[in-house]
Image (cartoon, rainbow, N blue to C red):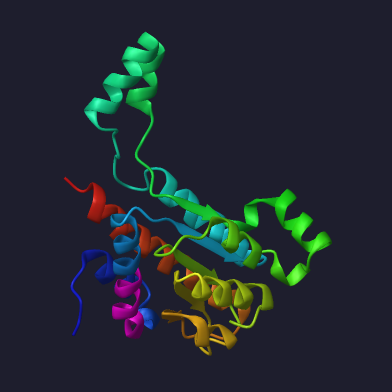
Amino acid sequence: MMIKDKYLDQLCERYPVLSDLRNCIADAAVMIIGCYSRGGKLLICGNGGSSADADHFAAELMKSFELRRPLDESLRKRFTDISGSRGKHLGESLEHALPAISLPSNTALATAISNDIDPSLIYAQQVIGYGDEGDVLIGISTSGNSQNIVDACITAKALNLNVIGITGVNGGKMKHYCDLLVNVPETRTAWVQELHLPVLHAICLMVENHFYSR
């Protein structure tokens, strides 16, 4: 069944090569919406350019992307009650966030894990620490074979997290540990990465629209 969504329409119009993944991308958004609706969070990991994509994706979720996300009136009032004019400024300026942690961003922890335990476990150990049942791990890997991402996926499955893999066309080893695989139809690293970003943006738009459209 073809899922109707204006953001998917825009994505496939601008990137026709992604049309066959339309429903898969929609399913990824639905999985993330379900996670947030249950009070869960996203853990996101990648290497190199994909680590930058993990940071980027987390940033778009943790603050407004295209829609305003004002705090509830009761919370704004609480800010004002606590700290007068400064509290009023905080209440009016801060926004709702969709909780997302970019695992590559914690340099001190990643280097400690690499030095003290095993370099391939820099993400798996963080999944142990941050992951709760029902959360979603998003592993971004152009090949799908990055051992630290594969290990994070295995760890997430052991903890009953849902796993979304975002890869190149082959899916690599990751595909065996993913509940959902978005495998864009390219093999060349740079070209895979060029398609990952619009996929992530479309997911952000769908998720944000679900929670914050008026």
In reply to whether residue 160 is colored magenta, the answer given is no
x, y (%) of residue 140?
A: 55, 71
Q: Is residue 214 above or below residue 115?
A: above
Camera-nearest residue between 154 and 98: 154
Q: Is residue 148 above or below residue 97?
A: below
Q: Decide which of 61, 189 is in the foreground and name it.
A: 61
* Residue 22 among those drawn in magenta: yes
**Viewer-closest of 12 and 160:** 160
As drawn, which residue projects farthest toward the right? 115
Q: Give left or right: position of 200 versus 51.
A: left
Q: Residue furthest top?
A: 84
Pinpoint residue 14: horizontal percent, then vertical percent.
35, 71
Query: In the picture provided, is 86 more to the left or to the right than 142?
Result: left
Q: Residue 151: which quarter of the image?
A: bottom right
Q: Which residues are magenta?
A: 19-28
Q: Residue at x 34, y 24 (%)?
A: 91
Residue visible at 23% across and 56% down in the picture: 210
Quadrant where the image shows the N terminus: bottom left
Q: Quadrant of residue 17?
A: bottom left
Residue at horizontal 45%, vertical 59%?
42
Q: Please, which residue is most extreme toward the bottom here?
A: 170
Q: Name the dominant secondary structure of the magenta segment.
A: helix
Percent position of residue 99, x then y:
43, 50
In the displayed structure, would residue 125 be above or below residue 78?
below
Q: Is residue 103 above or below residue 86?
A: below
Write down the quadrant of residue 130 in the picture.
bottom right
Q: Residue at x 52, y 71 (%)?
A: 156
164 horizontally vs 214: left or right: right
Relative horizontal placement of residue 129, taking residue 90 as reference (left or right): right
What percent of the width, then of the height, locates residue 142?
58, 78
